[in-house]
């Protein structure tokens, strides 16, 4: 049977379904097959194969209806689960084959209903495998070639560029993600060149890869607004270990992402969640970027997030007395500034009737002294831009603002314990930034650990050794 005949067959079944109950049942036999028909068309199915697909479809559909009846999965429950499914799929947070098993759990469905979704996911997987076994090797080859061609066409920059102006805007990108767009939009013109779009695709895959590391069973609360009716970036995600309970509130570690203060995303989290297995809750937050708001907007947002989590600690089973901070690069700067500046830069955003102070801070290769950082990179003008963007003007024009934005300026006897980690091969933030900060902390007798990682560049430390060192540090001061 050729492609046109398949279309006619499906069309005929749909038309008949409108005329009688008997024919409606015939149409239902294709319920499970419909999503496969478009894929299978290039394989040129025979009449016998199509009939077999209908038979398998009918049997699978009956099993699904039985599962829904047994587990009490109503239309409302299905809609709730689909909302979560679509949200995660669109944000690229999980691979497709993980979504079906995870969404029911993430939607906080009762165990019985969540189990029903898992059963249905497995049934659909078996159904697809059964149908594919009906194809000949020649048909499978044709199908694979058609799928590959379609995939390339779908990802093609020129195919997405609807107005053919050599740029992509947000409405031209499938499953658009604002955080990923900001990451790729290097010249901040709110559109992506072909080169920038390649960066967009790469970063989206990186997020998906990292988020696939989230331990199964983790309780996740996405996009919590820590400032009511605030900026779109003033949101956080919260991760709780499996089987956490309100009788034993969890110490909390807040992760603050890097990205030169001008880009980055709370979605890029995975290895950090090693802390879940060590009995910690982990929050990952977004803050306003320097591309739209200059300093001290970033530190105001971070402090507002701490206050929100402390105020709502009971709601999420958190220990409001034991909160720590962890960040890398620009995030390392922000957590260090929060740790040293005490109540400075508190701002007046969101919750204001609780403290934003924390008990321990982990800084991974963050800038600590803007003046010396500026001198270190003066021979590389392009490297100055992130500092200038953050402050809204050059350090030479406003040295006092640069001094106030530097964590090293605010170190006092009240500064909480610190863990500093830096790679010797870091060409973005010189390791001297950590060295002088360590010396300043020790001069005030602040408990501080300084770990130098040999031959490591400006990148997240992914080895279990470093993650264990972070966990041990927070265990010492938050438990």
Image (cartoon, grey):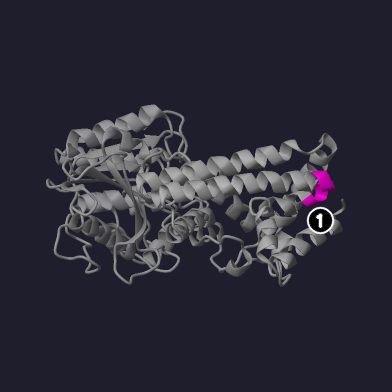
* Front one among 53 and 283: 53
Task: Assess whether residue 44 is covered by the magenta stretch.
Answer: yes
- Count of numbered marks: 1
Q: Measured along the vertical axis of the image, is residue 265 above or below residue 463?
A: below
Query: Where in the figure is residue 91, as x and y percent of width and height?
Result: 51, 55
- For this view, does 189 lie left or right of residue 238? right
The residue wearing badge 1 is 6
Task: Assess whether residue 246 is covered by the magenta stretch.
Answer: no
Query: Where in the figure is residue 15, as x and y percent of width and height?
Result: 74, 67
* Front one among 214 and 446: 214
For label 1, the SS is helix
- For this view, does 228 lie left or right of residue 203? left
Query: Where in the figure is residue 443, as x and y percent of width and height?
Result: 17, 39
- For this view, does 125 lie left or right of residue 72? right
The residue segment tinted magenta is: 41-48
* Front one among 398 and 110: 110
- Seen at 46% across and 30% down, the residue is 455
């Amino acid at each position: 049977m050729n492609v046109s005949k398949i279309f006619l067959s499906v069309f005929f079944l749909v038309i008949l379904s409108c005329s009688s109950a008997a024919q409606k049942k015939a149409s239902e036999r294709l319920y499970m097959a419909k999503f496969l028909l478009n894929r299978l068309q290039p394989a040129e199915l025979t009449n016998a194969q199509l009939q077999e697909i209908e038979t398998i479809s009918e049997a699978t559909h009956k099993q699904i209806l039985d599962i829904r009846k047994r587990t009490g999965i109503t239309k409302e429950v299905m809609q709730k689960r689909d909302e979560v499914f679509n949200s995660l799929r669109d944000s690229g947070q999980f691979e497709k084959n993980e979504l079906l098993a995870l969404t029911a759990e993430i939607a906080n469905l009762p165990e019985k209903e969540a189990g029903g979704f898992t059963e249905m996911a497995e049934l659909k997987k078996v159904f697809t495998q059964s149908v594919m076994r009906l194809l000949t090797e020649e048909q499978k080859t044709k199908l694979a070639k058609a799928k590959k061609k379609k995939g390339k066409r779908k990802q093609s920059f020129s195919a997405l560029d609807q107005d053919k102006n050599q740029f992509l805007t947000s409405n031209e990108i499938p499953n658009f993600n604002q955080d990923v767009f900001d990451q790729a939009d290097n010249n901040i013109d709110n559109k992506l060149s072909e080169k920038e779009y390649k960066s967009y695709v790469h970063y989206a895959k990186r997020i998906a890869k990292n988020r696939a590391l989230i331990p199964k069973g983790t309780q996740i609360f996405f996009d919590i607004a820590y400032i009511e009716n605030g900026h779109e970036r003033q949101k956080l995600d919260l991760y709780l270990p499996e089987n956490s309970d309100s009788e034993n509130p969890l110490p909390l570690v807040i992760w603050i992402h890097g990205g030169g203060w001008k880009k980055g995303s709370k979605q890029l989290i995975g290895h950090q969640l090693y802390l879940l297995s060590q009995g910690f809750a982990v929050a990952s937050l977004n803050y306003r970027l320097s591309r739209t708001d200059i300093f001290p907007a970033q530190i105001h947002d971070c402090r507002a997030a701490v206050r929100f989590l402390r105020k709502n600690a009971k709601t999420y089973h958190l220990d409001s007395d034991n909160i720590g901070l962890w960040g890398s690069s620009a995030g390392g700067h922000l957590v260090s500034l929060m740790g040293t500046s005490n109540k400075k830069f508190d701002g007046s955003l969101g919750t204001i009737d609780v403290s934003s102070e924390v008990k321990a801070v982990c800084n991974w290769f963050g800038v600590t002294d803007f003046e010396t950082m500026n001198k270190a990179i003066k021979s590389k003008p392009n490297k100055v831009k992130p500092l200038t963007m953050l402050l809204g003007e050059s350090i030479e024009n406003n040295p006092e603002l640069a001094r106030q934005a530097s964590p090293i300026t605010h170190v006092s006897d009240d500064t909480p314990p610190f863990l500093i980690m830096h790679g010797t091969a870091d060409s973005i933030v010189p390791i001297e930034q950590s060295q002088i900060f360590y010396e300043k902390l020790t001069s005030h007798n602040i408990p501080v650990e300084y770990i130098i990682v040999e031959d490591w560049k400006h990148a997240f430390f992914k080895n279990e050794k470093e993650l264990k060192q972070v966990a041990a540090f927070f265990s010492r001061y938050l438990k």
